[in-house]
């Protein structure tokens, strides 16, 4: 009963808690920087908890109707990267490194935390999980290819290390949860999801706090270029969520799929993006990526409120439209 009450409180407070967690991480970076190694473990638990409401039938159904998955992946890796390329060319025509950073922030895979938002807002979890898993598998190939096409930069990534990390954070905990649900005929999810759900939300705050600590050094000195980059990152990030939401409305997605498209299309795995930027590029490329850590969750909370206002029965069933 106490955990359920805590869960309801966190559900209502998450739009405020998430940006505050990032800001707090920036303020107390010196005290928590040594704990960033926990991020993959926290992510793994969050994915496990979210997957406890799923079964193999749900996942099979999402894969059996591949068009929604294809639409989200196309939005992620074709539509938004091209829009960002145009914005980057217009706003930083003489600054190729910042332009590369903006584009990198939109060619990285969808954010794992999108699954947490989709779970909280009763979206199509099977669809979201399918997109995350497929995107995680494709990421080591899509990221360098996209950068090569859009910025002419040949990038070599440690594909094995990246795939191993994404497998641990997403694929493995999802499979474990699905297997447990299958073996126990759904009892695992019914018993443990209500207990784990508030813990998962607290872990989300922990991840954001640690991400905030990672970007803290970039906010220690003030300059107008940083402000300009922040404004452009906010605009690009907002456009991502907004266009994903509008696309879902135009295609008349039912609300669960609309939620999945909005968060899946708007959110990026900026932690992975920051690692790629730091490893393979100069620091000027890193800045737009790490700045997006600060605003991505804040904008997600805005669209969570917008999605709350959408009527469940307003749109027609997607099977009739996209089967």
Image (cartoon, grey):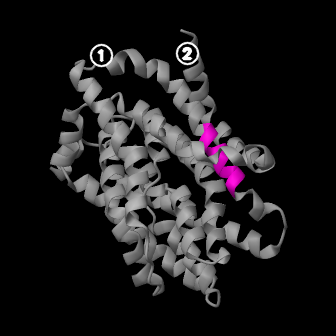
Secondary structure beneath dot 1 equals helix
Nearer-the-camera pick, 189 or 14: 189
* Above or below: residue 25 compared with residue 277: above
**Mark 2 lies on residue:** 3
Residue reaching furthest top? 1
Residues 237 and 6: in front is 6
Q: Name the side, left or right, on which 296 lies relative to 215.
A: left
The residue where tag 1 is placed is 187
Q: Position of residue 16 (x, y in %)?
A: 67, 38
Q: Nearer the viewer, residue 299 or 166?
A: 166
- Tell me residue 62's x, y (percent): 22, 44
Quarter-of-image position of residue 216: bottom right
From which residue to which does the magenta span run?
205-214
Q: Is residue 206 shown in magenta?
A: yes
Query: In the displayed structure, does residue 176 sit left or right of residue 285?
Result: left
Q: Position of residue 255 (x, y in %)?
A: 36, 40
**Secondary structure predominantly adopted by residues drawn in magenta:** helix
């Amino acid at each position: 009963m106490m955990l359920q009450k805590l869960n309801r409180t966190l559900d209502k407070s998450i739009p405020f808690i998430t940006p505050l967690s990032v800001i707090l991480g920036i303020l107390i970076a010196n005290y928590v920087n040594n704990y960033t190694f926990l991020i993959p473990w926290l992510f793994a638990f969050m994915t496990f908890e979210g997957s406890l409401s799923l079964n193999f039938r749900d996942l099979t159904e999402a894969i059996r109707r591949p068009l929604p998955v294809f639409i989200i992946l196309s939005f992620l890796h074709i539509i938004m990267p091209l829009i960002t390329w145009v914005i980057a060319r217009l706003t930083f025509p003489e600054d190729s490194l910042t332009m590369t950073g903006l584009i990198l922030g939109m060619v990285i895979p969808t954010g794992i935390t999108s699954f947490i938002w989709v779970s909280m807002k009763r979206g199509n979890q099977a669809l979201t999980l399918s997109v995350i898993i497929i995107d995680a598998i494709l990421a080591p190939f899509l990221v360098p290819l996209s950068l090569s096409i859009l910025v002419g930069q040949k990038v070599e990534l440690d594909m094995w290390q990246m795939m191993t990390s994404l497998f641990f954070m997403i694929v493995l905990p999802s499979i474990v949860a699905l297997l447990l649900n299958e073996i126990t005929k759904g009892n695992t999810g019914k018993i443990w999801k209500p207990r784990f759900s508030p813990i998962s939300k607290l872990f989300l705050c922990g991840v954001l706090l640690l991400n905030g600590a990672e970007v803290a050094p970039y906010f220690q000195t003030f300059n107008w270029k940083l402000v300009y980059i922040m404004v452009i990152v906010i605009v690009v990030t907002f456009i991502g969520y907004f266009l994903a939401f509008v696309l879902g409305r135009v295609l008349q997605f039912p609300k669960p799929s609309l939620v999945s498209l909005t968060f899946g299309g708007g959110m990026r795995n900026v932690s992975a993006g920051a690692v790629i930027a730091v490893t393979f590029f100069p620091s000027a490329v890193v800045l737009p990526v790490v700045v997006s850590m600060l605003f991505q969750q804040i904008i997600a909370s805005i669209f969570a409120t917008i999605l709350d206002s959408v009527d469940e029965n307003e749109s027609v069933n997607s099977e009739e439209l996209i089967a």
